[in-house]
């Protein structure tokens, strides 16, 4: 009887250590993967100087539609953030899925936009995946904000 109690206690202790280790790992990995909050919103107005072709494309589009001020978060080629992206074509895509959906893509950037629609007086917040194919930047996919 004493031997059975020892075996049961050892099994319970091992189970406890495994469960605590699992939840400890999950909590640590959640804190380190919250990369979206480490990016800052940048205000884009008529006097803003674009840093790259994509920001220039966004600025020209905002000028045409009179959307200023536009706020952007440029995530660039951050795969951790891309894994959180949910669009119309892609759902939390991996590198393989990106290559499959955009086989001719030379480059891509993920940018979150925030602006006020003046006609309906509401705030719009969306994330856009820009893809460079055949030397041109275009909208590859669009979705909601990244949390």
Image: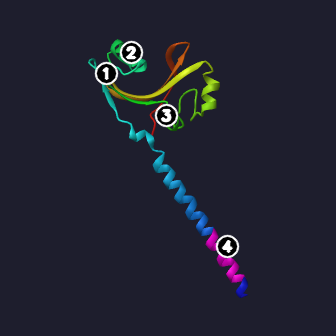
Q: Secondary structure at mark 4?
A: helix
Q: Earlier in the sequence, mark 2 or mark 1?
A: 2
Q: CA distance from mark 3 to mark 2?
A: 24 Å
Q: Earlier in the sequence, mark 4 or mark 3?
A: 4
The answer to which quarter of the image holds residue 94 is top right
Q: Residue 55: x, y in percent?
A: 39, 21
Disc ID at residue 61: 2
Residue 8 part of the magenta segment: yes
* Direction from residue 37 to residue 121 in the image, left or right: left
The answer to which quarter of the image holds residue 36 is top left
Residue interval drawn in magenta? 4-14
Residue drawn at x 58%, y 29% as measured from the top left: 90
* Residue bearing the label numbered 1: 118
In depth, the one of 35 and 141 nearer the eye is 35
Give neighbour class at mark 2: few <14, some 14-19, many 20+ (Cα, 10 Å).
few
* Residue bearing the label numbered 3: 78
Q: Earlier in the sequence, mark 3 or mark 2?
A: 2
* Direction from residue 145 to residue 79 in the image, left or right: right
- Residue mark closest to the camera, 2 vs 4: 4
């Amino acid at each position: 009887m004493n031997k059975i109690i020892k075996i049961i206690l050892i099994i319970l202790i091992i189970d406890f250590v495994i469960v605590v280790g699992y939840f400890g790992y999950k909590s640590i990995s959640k804190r380190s993967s919250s990369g979206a909050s480490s990016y800052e919103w940048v205000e884009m107005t008529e006097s803003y100087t674009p840093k790259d072709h994509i920001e220039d494309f966004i600025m020209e589009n905002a000028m045409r539609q009179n959307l200023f001020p536009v706020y952007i978060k440029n995530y660039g080629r951050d795969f951790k953030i891309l894994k959180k992206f949910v669009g119309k074509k892609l759902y939390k895509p991996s590198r393989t899925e990106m290559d499959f959906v955009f086989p001719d893509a030379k480059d891509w950037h993920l940018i979150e936009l925030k602006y006020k629609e003046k006609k309906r007086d509401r705030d719009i917040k969306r994330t856009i995946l820009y893809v460079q194919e055949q030397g041109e930047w275009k909208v590859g996919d669009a979705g909601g904000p990244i949390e």
